[in-house]
Every structure is written in structure tokens, then in C-alpha cells.
Image: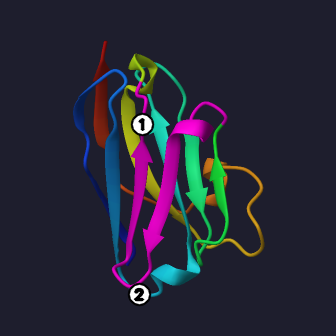
Amino acid sequence: QLQLVESGGGSAQANGSVTLSCKMSGDRFNIFWMGWFRQALGKEREGVAAISPSGASELYADGVKDRSRISRNNRANTMSLELSSLKPEDTATYYCAAAYYVGVMQDIDATHFEAWGQGTRVTVSS
């Protein structure tokens, strides 16, 4: 059974940075697209970034495109998201997700993803 566990959340200052990590248990990590989503209080879950099984393709939401980087380590079954130039509006619970998706993903759509972590909270103060 696929399990995803996020880590790295916490409190941060505006203009600072945070690195979130996700570890997947189970086999065949390298066949899954991996993604990060976030949900702020009272708002819908939104896609932040996604990365292809090989790591060759990356997708980013417009709001984080120039200040984030997603990466993965297929040997360690881990994925990371570095988010810099933090803003108070980055405050949210961040979720790691896995998708068995054939082809090249064109958008970071939650409906593509089958497995989800429990989330890690990031709070950005000004």
C-alpha cells in the first residue's frame, strides 16, 4: 500500500524559505508523477508543483513559478519542494501526492493523483 509522509513544515518569516520533503513507502516510486498541493484555511486545494517519474519534466503554478523548485530522488523514494521569497499568502497545509499517469501531465490537477499524504503546515508571518 502506498503511503506518503510529508515533513519540513513549520513557521517562517516573509521573504524566507522553506523546504518540504515527502517520502513514499512501497515499491516503484519511479513510476509515479509526484506533486505538491496546498490548502489555505477556507480555500480550495490548489496545485503547487509536479514532477515526472524521471524528474525530466516539472510543472509549477503561476504563483510560485519563479520562486520554487521541485525535485526527487528515486533511489531514496523522496521528493522535495523548495519555496523561497515566502509570502503570508503561502500559509497553508501542504500535501504530497502521487499519480500513476501515462503521458506528460499538462496541469497540476488533483484529479490526476490517487495517493495523498496527511499534510504539513506552513505558516508565514510578515
| 42 left or right of 4 in image | right
Q: Position of residue 101 (x, y in %)?
A: 68, 71
Q: Residue drawn at (62%, 69%), measured in percent from left and top?
A: 52
Q: Is residue 68 magenta?
A: yes
Examine the image and state in which quarter residue 15 appears: top left
Q: Amino acid at mark 1?
A: Ser
Count the marks.
2
Examine the image and state in which quarter residue 103 appears: bottom right
Up-down relation of residue 42 to residue 30 (above or below): above
In this view of the protein, can residue 93 be seen by the observer? yes
Label 1: which secondary element: loop
In this view of the protein, can residue 119 be seen by the observer? no
Q: Residue drawn at (59%, 75%), measured in percent from left and top?
A: 53
Say which of 15 and 34 sits in front. Answer: 15
Quadrant in the picture for the C terminus: top left
Any mark on residue 27, and which? 2
Magenta highlight range: 62-86
Say which of 92 and 90 sits in front. Answer: 90
Q: Earlier in the sequence, mark 2 or mark 1?
A: 2
Q: Residue drawn at (73%, 62%), measured in percent from left and top?
A: 105
Mark 2 vs mark 1: give the one in front.
1
Residue at label 1? 84
Crowd rating for badge 1 (residues with CA inside 10 Å; few <14, some 14–19, many 20+): some
Q: Amino acid at mark 2?
A: Asp
Quadrant in the picture for the N terminus: bottom left
Crowd rating for badge 2 (residues with CA inside 10 Å; few <14, some 14–19, many 20+): few
Q: Position of residue 119 (x, y in %)?
A: 33, 46
